[in-house]
């Protein structure tokens, strides 16, 4: 009987461990990202398919209120200015539920985009249907996609760079390095990093 209890406990522990190590839902490197149609701050609907000439996309889940997201706004604008003309535009998406975070309402998104002079679409994930597909958990959380015959392939997931608080101290520009590699038809060396930011408000 004692051996049976020990065996049972070991089995239970194994099941708990297995359950806790199940990968969260969302895209992985190599996944094909499905398209979406979300409202931009100019009240127009935006989809990836609208960008006929794009070679890929820098999809960034971000928001108004999070200090991490705010700290990255200028860098996000710089990424768009640099890479949009090279075929990799920034597509920013606010994934937060405005009922949980009032500062992330659609009307306040419009105000923020105008204040900062966003050069990219700033889309509202109405109903919070898109960010779970991607597996985003933070703001900001980045997905670099490469357009192929098979669809938009996920090539990088994670942080923008390695220092959210001080741009002058950045040593690794993860998104920039990933896009530069793709533009040269090279493999992305650092494919995933840990996204640092505020938890998405569901």
Image: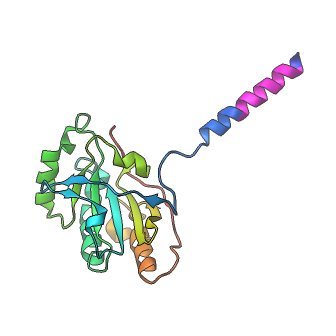
* Residue 95 among magenta residues: no
Residues 3 and 146: in front is: 146
* Residue 11 among magenta residues: yes
Give the quarter of the figure containing the C terminus.
Answer: top left
For the magenta stretch, what is the residue range?
A: 3-14
Colour mapping used in the image? rainbow
Horizontal relation, residue 118 to residue 1: left or right: left
Q: Position of residue 126 (x, y in %)?
A: 25, 44
Horizontal relation, residue 112 to residue 59: left or right: left
Horizontal relation, residue 101 to residue 6: left or right: left
Q: Residue at x 67, y 37 (%)?
A: 17
Q: Quadrant of residue 160?
A: bottom left
Give the quarter of the figure containing the N terminus.
Answer: top right
Horizontal relation, residue 17 to residue 165: left or right: right
Q: Residue at x 40, y 61 (%)?
A: 143
Residue 56 appears in view: yes
Q: Decide whether the magenta segment is chiefly helix, strand or loop.
A: helix
**Furthest residue toward bottom:** 184
Q: Residue at x 17, y 50 (%)?
A: 109
Q: Position of residue 157 (x, y in %)?
A: 45, 60
In the displayed structure, 75 sits above or below 68; it is: below
Q: Residue at x 41, y 49 (%)?
A: 133
Residues 15 and 170: in front is: 15
**Furthest residue toward top:** 1
Q: Position of residue 86 (x, y in %)?
A: 31, 80
In the displayed structure, 141 sits above or below 17; it is: below
Residues 20 and 29: in front is: 29
Q: Position of residue 186 (x, y in %)?
A: 50, 80
């Amino acid at each position: 009987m004692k051996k049976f209890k020990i065996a049972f406990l070991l089995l239970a522990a194994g099941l708990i461990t297995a359950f806790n190590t199940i990968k969260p839902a969302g895209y992985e490197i190599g996944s094909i990202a499905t398209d979406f149609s979300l409202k931009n701050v100019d009240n127009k609907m935006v989809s990836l398919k609208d960008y006929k000439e794009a070679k890929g996309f820098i999809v960034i889940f971000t928001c108004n209120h999070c200090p991490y997201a705010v700290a990255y706004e200028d860098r996000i604008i710089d990424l768009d200015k640099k890479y949009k003309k090279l075929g990799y535009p920034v597509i920013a998406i606010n994934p937060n539920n405005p009922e949980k975070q009032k500062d992330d309402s659609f009307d306040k998104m419009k105000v923020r985009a105008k204040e900062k002079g966003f050069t990219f679409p700033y889309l509202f994930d109405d109903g919070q249907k898109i960010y779970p597909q991607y597996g985003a958990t933070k703001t900001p959380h980045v997905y670099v996609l490469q357009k192929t015959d098979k669809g938009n392939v996920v090539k990088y997931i994670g942080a923008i760079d390695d220092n959210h608080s001080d741009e002058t101290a950045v040593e690794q520009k993860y998104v920039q390095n990933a896009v530069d590699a793709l533009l040269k038809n090279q493999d992305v060396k650092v494919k995933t990093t840990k996204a640092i930011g505020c938890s998405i408000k569901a």
